Amino acid sequence: MEKISGGKFLIKTYEEVMEKYGSDKPDLRIPLEIRDFTSNSGSLGSNILDSIISKGDVIKGLILENGSGYSRKILDNINEYIRELGGAGAIWMKKGEEGFKSSLKIDSSSIEKFFKAESVGESDIVFLIGGPKEQALNLTGRLREYLGKDMIDKDKLEFLWVVDFPLFFYNEDEQRFDSNHHPFTSPKLDEIDLLDSDPLKVNSIAYDLVLNGVEIGGGSRRINNIDLQRKIFRLLKLSDEEIDEKFGFFINALKFGAPPHLGIALGMDRIVMLLTGEESIREVISFPKTTSSLCLLTGSPSTVSGRQLEELNIEFSDKKK
Protein backbone atom coordinates (compact mmCIF):
# COMPACT_ATOMS: atom_id res chain seq x y z
CA MET A 1 0.00 0.00 0.00
CA GLU A 2 1.45 3.32 -1.03
CA LYS A 3 1.83 5.89 1.72
CA ILE A 4 2.68 9.56 1.94
CA SER A 5 5.91 9.87 3.90
CA GLY A 6 5.30 11.82 7.09
CA GLY A 7 1.69 12.42 6.07
CA LYS A 8 2.43 15.87 4.64
CA PHE A 9 3.85 17.77 1.69
CA LEU A 10 7.30 19.24 2.36
CA ILE A 11 8.18 22.76 1.19
CA LYS A 12 11.75 23.61 0.13
CA THR A 13 13.24 26.54 -1.76
CA TYR A 14 14.89 26.17 -5.14
CA GLU A 15 18.25 27.10 -3.62
CA GLU A 16 17.87 24.45 -0.90
CA VAL A 17 17.01 21.58 -3.26
CA MET A 18 19.82 22.48 -5.65
CA GLU A 19 22.37 22.56 -2.81
CA LYS A 20 21.15 19.32 -1.22
CA TYR A 21 20.08 17.28 -4.22
CA GLY A 22 21.48 18.94 -7.35
CA SER A 23 18.01 18.94 -8.94
CA ASP A 24 14.87 21.09 -8.81
CA LYS A 25 12.78 17.90 -8.86
CA PRO A 26 14.55 15.62 -6.39
CA ASP A 27 13.38 12.16 -5.45
CA LEU A 28 13.24 12.39 -1.66
CA ARG A 29 13.00 8.62 -1.34
CA ILE A 30 16.75 8.54 -1.91
CA PRO A 31 18.42 9.00 1.52
CA LEU A 32 21.47 10.86 0.19
CA GLU A 33 22.29 14.56 0.41
CA ILE A 34 25.04 16.49 -1.34
CA ARG A 35 27.82 17.85 0.85
CA ASP A 36 30.23 20.71 0.18
CA PHE A 37 33.78 19.44 0.71
CA THR A 38 35.60 22.47 -0.74
CA SER A 39 37.22 23.71 2.48
CA ASN A 40 38.57 20.37 3.73
CA SER A 41 39.60 19.13 0.26
CA GLY A 42 42.47 21.57 0.35
CA SER A 43 44.05 19.55 3.17
CA LEU A 44 44.28 16.36 1.11
CA GLY A 45 47.43 17.43 -0.71
CA SER A 46 46.09 16.67 -4.19
CA ASN A 47 47.27 18.85 -7.07
CA ILE A 48 44.06 18.10 -8.94
CA LEU A 49 41.82 19.23 -6.06
CA ASP A 50 44.05 22.22 -5.30
CA SER A 51 43.82 23.32 -8.94
CA ILE A 52 40.01 23.18 -8.84
CA ILE A 53 39.87 25.23 -5.63
CA SER A 54 42.45 27.79 -6.82
CA LYS A 55 40.21 28.61 -9.82
CA GLY A 56 37.37 29.49 -7.45
CA ASP A 57 35.45 26.31 -8.27
CA VAL A 58 33.94 23.95 -5.70
CA ILE A 59 34.19 20.33 -4.55
CA LYS A 60 30.81 18.69 -4.02
CA GLY A 61 30.23 15.10 -3.05
CA LEU A 62 28.31 12.30 -1.39
CA ILE A 63 28.93 9.99 1.54
CA LEU A 64 27.64 6.48 0.94
CA GLU A 65 27.30 4.55 4.18
CA ASN A 66 28.83 1.07 4.22
CA GLY A 67 30.05 1.56 0.67
CA SER A 68 33.71 0.78 1.27
CA GLY A 69 33.14 -2.70 -0.15
CA TYR A 70 32.46 -1.38 -3.66
CA SER A 71 34.59 -3.30 -6.14
CA ARG A 72 36.96 -1.63 -8.57
CA LYS A 73 34.62 -2.53 -11.41
CA ILE A 74 31.69 -0.74 -9.76
CA LEU A 75 33.87 2.31 -9.08
CA ASP A 76 35.06 2.34 -12.70
CA ASN A 77 31.44 2.18 -13.88
CA ILE A 78 30.57 5.14 -11.66
CA ASN A 79 33.52 7.10 -13.01
CA GLU A 80 32.54 6.30 -16.60
CA TYR A 81 28.94 7.35 -15.93
CA ILE A 82 30.06 10.82 -14.82
CA ARG A 83 32.29 11.12 -17.87
CA GLU A 84 29.38 10.23 -20.14
CA LEU A 85 27.51 13.16 -18.58
CA GLY A 86 30.34 15.51 -19.54
CA GLY A 87 32.27 15.54 -16.27
CA ALA A 88 35.92 14.74 -15.66
CA GLY A 89 34.96 11.77 -13.50
CA ALA A 90 34.17 10.98 -9.87
CA ILE A 91 36.94 10.82 -7.27
CA TRP A 92 36.49 8.23 -4.52
CA MET A 93 38.07 7.71 -1.10
CA LYS A 94 37.59 4.78 1.26
CA LYS A 95 39.30 2.58 3.81
CA GLY A 96 40.66 -0.72 2.56
CA GLU A 97 42.45 -3.60 4.20
CA GLU A 98 45.75 -1.75 3.98
CA GLY A 99 44.52 1.65 5.12
CA PHE A 100 42.80 4.61 3.48
CA LYS A 101 43.09 4.96 -0.27
CA SER A 102 41.71 7.01 -3.14
CA SER A 103 41.45 7.13 -6.92
CA LEU A 104 43.90 10.04 -6.66
CA LYS A 105 47.44 10.00 -5.30
CA ILE A 106 46.63 11.05 -1.73
CA ASP A 107 48.48 10.08 1.42
CA SER A 108 46.55 7.60 3.60
CA SER A 109 46.94 9.74 6.72
CA SER A 110 45.51 12.79 4.91
CA ILE A 111 42.42 10.82 3.92
CA GLU A 112 42.03 9.61 7.51
CA LYS A 113 42.13 13.20 8.79
CA PHE A 114 39.59 14.19 6.12
CA PHE A 115 37.25 11.40 7.23
CA LYS A 116 37.45 12.54 10.85
CA ALA A 117 36.92 16.21 9.95
CA GLU A 118 33.85 15.38 7.85
CA SER A 119 32.50 12.76 10.31
CA VAL A 120 32.75 9.98 7.72
CA GLY A 121 32.53 6.41 9.02
CA GLU A 122 35.41 4.02 8.30
CA SER A 123 33.05 1.68 6.43
CA ASP A 124 31.76 4.52 4.24
CA ILE A 125 32.94 5.71 0.84
CA VAL A 126 33.20 9.34 -0.26
CA PHE A 127 32.69 10.54 -3.82
CA LEU A 128 33.97 13.96 -4.90
CA ILE A 129 33.12 15.94 -8.03
CA GLY A 130 34.80 19.28 -8.70
CA GLY A 131 34.17 22.15 -11.07
CA PRO A 132 32.09 25.32 -11.44
CA LYS A 133 29.33 25.27 -8.84
CA GLU A 134 26.37 24.75 -11.18
CA GLN A 135 28.10 21.94 -13.06
CA ALA A 136 29.38 20.25 -9.89
CA LEU A 137 25.93 20.31 -8.30
CA ASN A 138 24.27 18.95 -11.44
CA LEU A 139 26.74 16.08 -11.81
CA THR A 140 26.64 15.21 -8.11
CA GLY A 141 22.84 15.26 -8.29
CA ARG A 142 22.92 12.80 -11.17
CA LEU A 143 25.36 10.63 -9.20
CA ARG A 144 22.96 10.75 -6.24
CA GLU A 145 20.21 9.35 -8.46
CA TYR A 146 22.55 6.71 -9.90
CA LEU A 147 23.73 5.49 -6.50
CA GLY A 148 20.30 5.75 -4.90
CA LYS A 149 18.20 3.87 -7.42
CA ASP A 150 18.41 0.67 -5.35
CA MET A 151 17.66 2.49 -2.06
CA ILE A 152 14.16 3.58 -3.05
CA ASP A 153 11.11 2.38 -1.15
CA LYS A 154 8.66 2.00 -4.03
CA ASP A 155 5.71 2.04 -1.64
CA LYS A 156 6.43 5.63 -0.62
CA LEU A 157 4.90 8.79 -2.06
CA GLU A 158 7.25 11.70 -1.36
CA PHE A 159 5.54 14.97 -2.26
CA LEU A 160 7.49 18.22 -2.33
CA TRP A 161 6.64 21.84 -3.08
CA VAL A 162 9.61 23.69 -4.60
CA VAL A 163 9.29 27.47 -4.24
CA ASP A 164 11.29 30.68 -4.69
CA PHE A 165 12.68 29.99 -8.14
CA PRO A 166 15.06 32.66 -9.47
CA LEU A 167 13.22 35.07 -11.74
CA PHE A 168 16.13 35.20 -14.22
CA PHE A 169 19.22 33.33 -15.29
CA TYR A 170 22.06 34.84 -17.28
CA ASN A 171 22.39 33.69 -20.88
CA GLU A 172 26.15 33.60 -21.49
CA ASP A 173 25.79 32.99 -25.23
CA GLU A 174 23.59 36.03 -25.82
CA GLN A 175 24.98 38.11 -22.93
CA ARG A 176 21.58 38.92 -21.47
CA PHE A 177 19.03 37.86 -18.88
CA ASP A 178 16.47 35.16 -19.70
CA SER A 179 13.31 34.31 -17.78
CA ASN A 180 13.61 31.17 -15.70
CA HIS A 181 9.96 30.31 -16.38
CA HIS A 182 8.41 32.95 -18.65
CA PRO A 183 8.38 36.77 -18.75
CA PHE A 184 4.90 37.02 -17.23
CA THR A 185 5.92 35.47 -13.89
CA SER A 186 5.69 37.92 -11.00
CA PRO A 187 8.78 38.66 -8.90
CA LYS A 188 8.39 38.41 -5.14
CA LEU A 189 6.81 41.72 -4.18
CA ASP A 190 9.36 42.56 -1.50
CA GLU A 191 12.23 42.05 -3.97
CA ILE A 192 11.01 44.28 -6.82
CA ASP A 193 13.55 47.01 -5.92
CA LEU A 194 16.36 44.54 -6.68
CA LEU A 195 15.34 44.57 -10.35
CA ASP A 196 17.28 47.84 -10.68
CA SER A 197 20.38 46.80 -8.75
CA ASP A 198 20.78 43.00 -8.93
CA PRO A 199 18.17 41.18 -11.05
CA LEU A 200 19.77 37.76 -10.53
CA LYS A 201 18.95 37.95 -6.81
CA VAL A 202 15.23 38.37 -7.48
CA ASN A 203 13.05 35.33 -6.80
CA SER A 204 9.71 34.66 -8.44
CA ILE A 205 6.31 33.76 -7.07
CA ALA A 206 6.45 30.37 -8.73
CA TYR A 207 6.03 26.84 -7.43
CA ASP A 208 6.38 23.27 -8.64
CA LEU A 209 4.81 20.17 -7.14
CA VAL A 210 7.16 17.18 -7.26
CA LEU A 211 6.30 13.55 -6.55
CA ASN A 212 9.03 10.92 -6.32
CA GLY A 213 11.38 12.93 -8.53
CA VAL A 214 8.77 13.81 -11.16
CA GLU A 215 7.31 17.28 -11.62
CA ILE A 216 3.55 16.71 -11.63
CA GLY A 217 2.44 20.33 -11.52
CA GLY A 218 3.59 23.90 -11.68
CA GLY A 219 2.27 27.42 -11.50
CA SER A 220 2.97 31.02 -10.68
CA ARG A 221 1.51 34.41 -9.94
CA ARG A 222 1.25 36.53 -13.08
CA ILE A 223 2.27 40.16 -13.41
CA ASN A 224 -0.76 42.44 -13.39
CA ASN A 225 1.02 45.82 -13.40
CA ILE A 226 1.85 47.48 -16.74
CA ASP A 227 4.98 49.29 -15.54
CA LEU A 228 6.39 46.14 -13.93
CA GLN A 229 5.67 44.09 -17.05
CA ARG A 230 7.47 46.63 -19.24
CA LYS A 231 10.43 46.64 -16.83
CA ILE A 232 10.72 42.85 -17.12
CA PHE A 233 10.61 43.02 -20.91
CA ARG A 234 13.35 45.69 -20.94
CA LEU A 235 15.55 43.58 -18.66
CA LEU A 236 15.22 40.87 -21.31
CA LYS A 237 16.67 43.40 -23.78
CA LEU A 238 13.45 44.01 -25.65
CA SER A 239 13.11 47.52 -27.07
CA ASP A 240 9.88 49.48 -26.62
CA GLU A 241 9.16 48.89 -30.30
CA GLU A 242 9.60 45.12 -29.89
CA ILE A 243 7.44 45.11 -26.76
CA ASP A 244 4.61 46.87 -28.59
CA GLU A 245 4.99 44.68 -31.68
CA LYS A 246 5.11 41.33 -29.86
CA PHE A 247 3.09 42.01 -26.71
CA GLY A 248 1.12 45.19 -27.43
CA PHE A 249 -2.20 43.33 -27.19
CA PHE A 250 -1.28 42.11 -23.70
CA ILE A 251 0.01 45.47 -22.45
CA ASN A 252 -3.14 47.13 -23.78
CA ALA A 253 -5.34 44.57 -22.00
CA LEU A 254 -3.66 45.36 -18.68
CA LYS A 255 -4.81 48.98 -19.03
CA PHE A 256 -8.35 47.84 -18.24
CA GLY A 257 -7.22 46.43 -14.91
CA ALA A 258 -6.37 42.90 -13.84
CA PRO A 259 -6.53 41.59 -10.29
CA PRO A 260 -3.63 39.62 -8.78
CA HIS A 261 -4.08 36.11 -10.15
CA LEU A 262 -2.26 32.82 -9.97
CA GLY A 263 -2.90 29.15 -10.59
CA ILE A 264 -1.41 25.74 -11.22
CA ALA A 265 -1.45 23.18 -14.01
CA LEU A 266 -1.26 19.50 -13.14
CA GLY A 267 0.17 16.86 -15.47
CA MET A 268 -2.47 14.15 -15.30
CA ASP A 269 -0.50 11.79 -17.54
CA ARG A 270 2.48 11.96 -15.17
CA ILE A 271 0.25 11.44 -12.14
CA VAL A 272 -1.35 8.37 -13.74
CA MET A 273 2.10 7.05 -14.66
CA LEU A 274 3.22 7.27 -11.03
CA LEU A 275 0.01 5.83 -9.59
CA THR A 276 0.16 2.84 -11.96
CA GLY A 277 3.85 2.23 -11.27
CA GLU A 278 4.87 2.66 -14.89
CA GLU A 279 8.43 3.71 -15.75
CA SER A 280 7.50 5.64 -18.91
CA ILE A 281 4.75 8.17 -19.56
CA ARG A 282 4.30 6.56 -22.98
CA GLU A 283 2.53 3.65 -21.27
CA VAL A 284 -0.36 5.87 -20.13
CA ILE A 285 -0.76 8.11 -23.19
CA SER A 286 -3.37 7.06 -25.73
CA PHE A 287 -1.35 7.85 -28.82
CA PRO A 288 2.31 8.39 -27.85
CA LYS A 289 4.79 9.64 -30.42
CA THR A 290 7.84 7.63 -31.35
CA THR A 291 11.34 8.59 -30.18
CA SER A 292 11.74 10.48 -33.48
CA SER A 293 8.55 12.51 -32.76
CA LEU A 294 6.37 10.70 -35.31
CA CYS A 295 2.67 10.22 -34.63
CA LEU A 296 1.82 6.74 -35.90
CA LEU A 297 -1.92 7.46 -35.64
CA THR A 298 -2.06 10.54 -37.88
CA GLY A 299 1.16 10.07 -39.82
CA SER A 300 2.37 13.45 -38.62
CA PRO A 301 4.55 15.23 -39.51
CA SER A 302 3.72 14.94 -43.20
CA THR A 303 4.23 17.03 -46.32
CA VAL A 304 2.07 20.12 -46.85
CA SER A 305 1.04 21.99 -49.96
CA GLY A 306 2.39 25.33 -51.08
CA ARG A 307 -1.01 26.88 -50.40
CA GLN A 308 -0.91 25.74 -46.77
CA LEU A 309 2.55 27.25 -46.35
CA GLU A 310 1.31 30.49 -47.88
CA GLU A 311 -1.62 30.64 -45.47
CA LEU A 312 0.82 30.33 -42.55
CA ASN A 313 3.21 32.88 -44.09
CA ILE A 314 6.00 30.27 -44.23
CA GLU A 315 8.57 30.37 -47.03
CA PHE A 316 11.48 28.01 -47.69
CA SER A 317 14.77 29.55 -48.76
CA ASP A 318 18.09 28.10 -49.87
CA LYS A 319 19.95 31.24 -48.88
CA LYS A 320 22.51 30.78 -46.15
CA LYS A 321 22.92 33.35 -43.40
Image: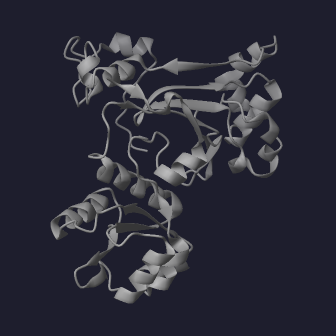
- Of 280 and 173, the residue lying toward us: 280
Please indicate whether residue 104 sits to the left or right of residue 296 in the image. Answer: right
Please indicate whether residue 213 sits to the left or right of residue 251 in the image. Answer: left
Residue at point 74%, 20% (across, down): 251
Which quadrant of the figure contains the N terminus?
A: top left
Residue 28 occupies which quadrant of the picture?
top left
Residue at point 72%, 44% (across, down): 202
Residue 178 occupies which quadrant of the picture?
top right
Residue at point 70%, 29% (across, down): 243
Residue 153 place in picture, x, y as percent: 32, 38
- Of 32 and 144, the residue lying toward us: 32
Residue 106 place in picture, x, y as percent: 36, 86
Which quadrant of the figure contains the C terminus?
A: top left
Please indicate whether residue 144 sits to the left or right of residue 131 in the image. Answer: left
Residue 191 place in picture, x, y as percent: 79, 41
- Of 154 and 265, the residue lying toward us: 154
**232 to 72, vertically: above or below:** above
**289 to 107, vertically: above or below:** above
**137 to 28, vertically: above or below:** below
Residue 161 in view, yes or no: yes
